[in-house]
Image: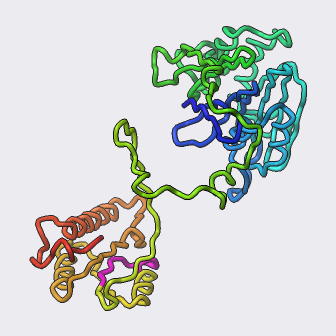
């Protein structure tokens, strides 16, 4: 996915990302600053609870704020980081190249490089347990382009290298990408950037099949063109998004979307405090687990009378109990908590799974019954008072 962003208070930039992802690992901005990055697989795994900015957000921040290599490096230094990544940053205006690696708080920087070639292994940090596939790809890349050194290479040579399928581990060209080939099996796109001419070339992705190796040209001058004057004042995006001085939302009548041309809808679930209409109402609760017990205590503290439905293998017995509850007093709620029972995950026990499926079917029948399936069994359900599951 190619995302072209024109921040209200930042530098226009293009970033290569995935659907649903805010940032990305490669991109270029309107100042001619280009960033490419890789995950370092030869660094030890960190604690799961590590705190820091995710790498795609860091790359997006660099492209949005950095005017040159120095400001880009300062952004990295001033960010609380997590994970281990390398970044290659080039500046078109000064024709300079910078390479850096970070592993959490550890940061190493090399300025004014003539050439950088890297895969998923460290060049500056101490490398540990280098994956063979990463070494194979780096060696092959050096064989293809390393001889050119500082003299550089053509766009065509760079494009061909990124789609190369020679597997050093197998000693031959493979008919499909592998972990050992430069064009790795999990690569989504190959990108060649030349900011000096405002051009970027990218492949369309593996789903394009026979056209997957064909590069498409992107014109940065057209993509970054904007009628809105750019400002050099860059704000923290959290302030822009959530600041107290944000303008008030327009009236509800003015915010209705234009249904014409709609491409998607999004529903957001939010928690809302709602008082019980009848403090003495009866509420059936189904489940034998700590969560069901906690829910019972919470409902009873709110004034409700909770009645437990039997948890058994016969759905008719459970439905009969629910009918009796309804005959005595119509109930507006039914809580199904059996998903948290101890036997909800029986492992590899086939008989236990069969029993679990039977109970799951019983829960579905309860849901269907409470939401209007053929009317309420006892004949007293109405749209106004029918239970909500």
Quick one: which residue is furthest to the left in this view?
A: 379
> Picture coordinates of residue 272 (x, y %)?
45, 71
Please tell me whether residue 83 is drawn above or below residue 344 in the rendered image.
above
Q: Quadrant of residue 329?
A: bottom left
Q: Which is nearer the eye, 164 or 207?
A: 207
**In the rendered picture of this protein, how many numbered marks are placed on residues?**
0
Name the residue at 75% across, 16% down: 196
Q: Which is nearer the eye, 200 or 220?
A: 220
Picture quarter with the C terminus: bottom left
- In the visual, does 166 lie left or right of 144? left
Picture quarter with the N terminus: top right
Name the residue at 32% across, 84% down: 277
- In the visual, does 270 lie left or right of 89? left
Colour style of the rendered protein structure: rainbow
> Picture coordinates of residue 36 (x, y %)?
72, 29
* Residue 43 is one of the magenta-drawn residues: no
* Residue 291 is one of the magenta-drawn residues: yes
Please tell me whether residue 356 is drawn above or below residue 67 in the rendered image.
below
Q: Which is nearer the eye, 108 or 186?
A: 108
Residue 40 in sight:
no
- In the visual, does 52 lie left or right of 204? right
Name the residue at 70% across, 34% down: 230
Q: Which is nearer the eye, 8 or 90?
A: 8
Task: Tell me which segment is drawn in magenta.
Answer: 283-292
> Picture coordinates of residue 59 (x, y %)?
71, 38
> Picture coordinates of residue 354 (x, y %)?
29, 61
Residue 222 in sight:
yes
Q: Quadrant of residue 268?
A: bottom left
- In the visual, does 45 lie left or right of 208? right
Name the residue at 87% across, 19% down: 114
């Amino acid at each position: 996915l190619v995302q072209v962003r024109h921040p209200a208070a930042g530098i226009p930039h293009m970033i290569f990302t995935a659907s649903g992802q805010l940032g990305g690992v490669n991109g270029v901005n309107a100042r001619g600053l280009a960033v490419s990055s890789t995950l370092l697989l030869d660094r030890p795994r960190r604690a799961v609870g590590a705190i820091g900015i995710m790498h795609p957000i860091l790359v997006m921040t660099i492209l949005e704020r950095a005017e040159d290599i120095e400001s880009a490096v300062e952004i990295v230094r001033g960010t609380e980081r997590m994970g281990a990544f390398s970044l290659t940053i080039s500046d078109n205006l000064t024709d300079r190249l910078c390479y850096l690696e970070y592993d959490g708080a550890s940061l190493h920087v090399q300025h004014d490089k003539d050439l950088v070639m890297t895969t998923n292994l460290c060049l500056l940090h101490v490398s540990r347990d280098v994956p063979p596939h990463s070494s194979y790809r780096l060696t092959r890349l050096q064989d293809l382009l390393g001889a050119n050194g500082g003299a550089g290479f053509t766009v065509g040579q760079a494009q061909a290298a990124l789609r190369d399928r020679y597997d050093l581990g197998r000693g031959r060209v493979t008919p499909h990408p592998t972990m050992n080939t430069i064009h790795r099996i999990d690569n989504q796109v190959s990108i060649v950037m030349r900011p000096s001419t405002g051009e970027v070339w990218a492949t369309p992705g593996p789903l394009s099949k026979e056209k997957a190796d064909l590069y498409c040209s992107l014109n940065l001058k057209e993509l970054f063109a904007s009628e809105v004057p750019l400002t050099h004042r860059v704000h923290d995006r959290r302030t822009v998004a959530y600041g107290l001085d944000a303008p008030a939302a327009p009236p509800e009548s003015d915010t209705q979307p234009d249904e014409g041309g709609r491409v998607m809808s999004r529903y957001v679930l939010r928690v809302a405090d709602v008082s019980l209409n009848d403090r003495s109402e009866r509420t059936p609760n189904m489940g034998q687990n700590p969560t069901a017990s906690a829910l019972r205590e919470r409902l009873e503290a709110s004034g409700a009378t909770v009645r437990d439905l039997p948890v058994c293998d016969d759905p008719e017995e459970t439905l009969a109990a629910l009918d009796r509850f309804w005959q005595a007093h119509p109930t507006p709620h039914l809580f199904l908590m059996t998903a948290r029972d101890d036997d909800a995950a029986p492992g590899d026990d086939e008989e236990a799974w069969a029993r679990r499926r039977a109970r799951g079917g019983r829960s579905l029948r309860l849901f269907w019954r409470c939401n209007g399936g053929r009317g309420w069994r006892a004949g007293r359900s109405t749209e106004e008072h029918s239970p909500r599951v």
